[in-house]
Every structure is written in structure tokens, then in C-alpha cells.
């Protein structure tokens, strides 16, 4: 079981697989006013940076589930590196339908809401693992500007303009689902650059090391096209943030 190989290649050197910098991730942990010992469930935990750094900095405990074999392995290594193996656990598995044995204080899905079939379904899934009154974290893109043409939508790697909404509509949507938005931390273009541009050097190095791999042609095409696509579309039109929600 694994995610499509292209992600395991292009994001192999990422610690954070979204447009948050290490500083933003630390800010999110700080603004949530986490209690030492608070329990966190993270569906689509990637390379485990959120749980590992929050365990080190704020004393949380956590469980992360991720379908990438490589990222799950990296998460375990990171826990060792930061000396938090006693506090965090990483499970390599499909998180669709995953419910924790023991209810948690914070249930998160940061940049992987397809796991619950969208925002509403993911909130519903996370709620099944959450103490009453606990906090849900949803990491999600939104349009910074509405795409004027279909080309711009496609350039942002979206299928349709309705894949995302503008920030005010996203906040309204959480309210419509009967949740208070109690905090939020938004990515900025610098964070997007770190997420997207880091893939370019990784692809270049991978191509040099794997010239005869079956995937070399695809990676070469991506490396050729991605910088221009990214600065033209994603960087200008897409925002991203993590929203902290508590049921009303
Ligand atoms: N939350 C992490 C990773 C976000 S990227 C971070 O912010 O760094 C999306 C992640 O979802 C990837 O790590 C990918 O491997 C994982 N993923 C995709 N589909 C999944 C599924 N069905 N179950 C569990 N993880 C999944």
C-alpha cells in the first residue's frame, strides 16, 4: 500500500508536506495553547513534523496515520532524532475511516481532507475520535483570487473552480457545519515557495541519480514545467491555512 510514486520522489526531502514553514507550524502549536500531555490524532501525518515538534516543544502525545511508506519511515526517524519516541507513534496505513481506540483532545487532518471525502466528511470522521469539546484542525487550500478562466483553474492543479472557495466562504462554511473557528494560521507565499520550490532541487538530484528509471521522463517533464506553472498560477491564486474548530 502506498501513495502514487511521484509524491514519494518529489517530496522525499520535505519535512512538511504543505505550504507551512517550521515557524508557522510552531505558531499553530503555540496559538492552540496546548496542555502538556494533550493527545493529538493526525490523519495523513506525512513525515510527522507536526506531532514530533509539538511533542518536543509543547509536551503533547500523538498518533499519526499515513499511507506513504517513505513518509511514515521518515516520521519514525524524526521522532528518534527529536527524542520523542515515547510520546508519538506513527502507523503506516490508509486513514480512510480510521477511528482512534481512545478519544483524543485534538484531531487533525492537515492537507489531506480527501481522506474523509472533503471537509465535512473529514470533520465527521475526526469527531468520532474526539473528546466532547475537543479541537479539530483542518488544513485546506482556498482561492486568494477567483480564477478568471478555466486555464487558471487547471494551472492550479484543480479540477474545477468549485474544488475550493474564497477565505470568507470557507469560514462561513465551518460556521454552517456548526463549528466555531477558534483560531487559524495562514500560509504565505514564502511558505508556498518552500513547499513547491523544494521539489525542484529534489527532482533535479533524483534525475541525476536515476537517469534510467522508468519515471525519469515524467520527472524531467515536471522539472521543466513546474517552476513556470507554479509562479504563474498556484503562487498567485491559492492560499492555504489551518483552521481550529470547536463544535458549537
Ligand atoms: N499533514 C502532513 C502531510 C500532508 S500531505 C503535513 O502537513 O506535512 C498529504 C499526506 O496524506 C501525504 O503524506 C500522503 O501520504 C497522505 N495520504 C494520502 N492519502 C492517504 C490516505 N488515504 N490515508 C493516509 N494518508 C494518506
Image (spheres, helix red, strand yellow):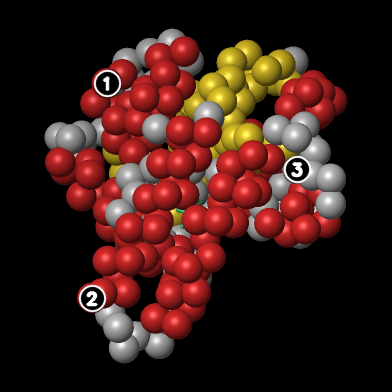
Write down the quadrant of residue 174 in the picture. top right
Are the residues flagged by discs 2 and 3 in contact, CB closer than 8 Å?
A: no
Q: Is any atom of residue 126 visible in this view? A: no
Secondary element at tag 2: helix
Viewer-proximal residue, 202 or 106?
A: 202
Q: Secondary structure at mark 3?
A: loop
Q: Is residue 114 above or below residue 103?
A: below
Residue 168 x/y as whole percent: 78, 23
Is ligand 1 closer than 8 angstroms to the Cβ of mark 1?
Answer: no
Q: Report the residue marked by disc 1.
A: 57
Residue 47 x %, y %: 35, 49
Earlier along the polypeptide chain: callout 2 or callout 3?
3
Residue behind mark 3: 164
Residue annotated with mark 2:
209
Mark 1 to mark 2 CA distance (whole Å) = 36 Å
At x 59%, y 56%, the residue is 229
Q: Counting residues from the N terminus, which is met first, the one under dot 3 or under dot 1?
A: 1
Amino acid at each position: 500500500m502506498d501513495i502514487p510514486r511521484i509524491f514519494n520522489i518529489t517530496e522525499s526531502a520535505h519535512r512538511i508536506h504543505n505550504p507551512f514553514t517550521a515557524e508557522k507550524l510552531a505558531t499553530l502549536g503555540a496559538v492552540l495553547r496546548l496542555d502538556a500531555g494533550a493527545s493529538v490524532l493526525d490523519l495523513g501525518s506525512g513525515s510527522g513534523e507536526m506531532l514530533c515538534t509539538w511533542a518536543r516543544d509543547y509536551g503533547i502525545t500523538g498518533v499519526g496515520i499515513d499511507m506513504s511508506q517513505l513518509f511514515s519511515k521518515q516520521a519514525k526517524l524524526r521522532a528518534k532524532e527529536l527524542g520523542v519516541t515515547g510520546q508519538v507513534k506513527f502507523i503506516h496505513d490508509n486513514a480512510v475511516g480510521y477511528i482512534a481506540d481512545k478519544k483524543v483532545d485534538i484531531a487533525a487532518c492537515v492537507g489531506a481532507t480527501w481522506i474523509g471525502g472533503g471537509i465535512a466528511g473529514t470533520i465527521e470522521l475526526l469527531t468520532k475520535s474526539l473528546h466532547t469539546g475537543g479541537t479539530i484542525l483542518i488544513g485546506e487550500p482556498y482561492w486568494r483570487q477567483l480564477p478568471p478562466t478555466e486555464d487558471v483553474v487547471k494551472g492550479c492543479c484543480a479540477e474545477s473552480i468549485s474544488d475550493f472557495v474564497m477565505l470568507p466562504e470557507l469560514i462561513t462554511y465551518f460556521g454552517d457545519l456548526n463549528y466555531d473557528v477558534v483560531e487559524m494560521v495562514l500560509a504565505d507565499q514564502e511558505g508556498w515557495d518552500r513547499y513547491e520550490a523544494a521539489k525542484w532541487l529534489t527532482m533535479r538530484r533524483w534525475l541525476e541519480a536515476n537517469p534510467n528509471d522508468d519515471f525519469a521522463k515524467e520527472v524531467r517533464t515536471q522539472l521543466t514545467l513546474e517552476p513556470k506553472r507554479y509562479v504563474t498560477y498556484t503562487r498567485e491564486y491559492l492560499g492555504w491555512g489551518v483552521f481550529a474548530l470547536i463544535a458549537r
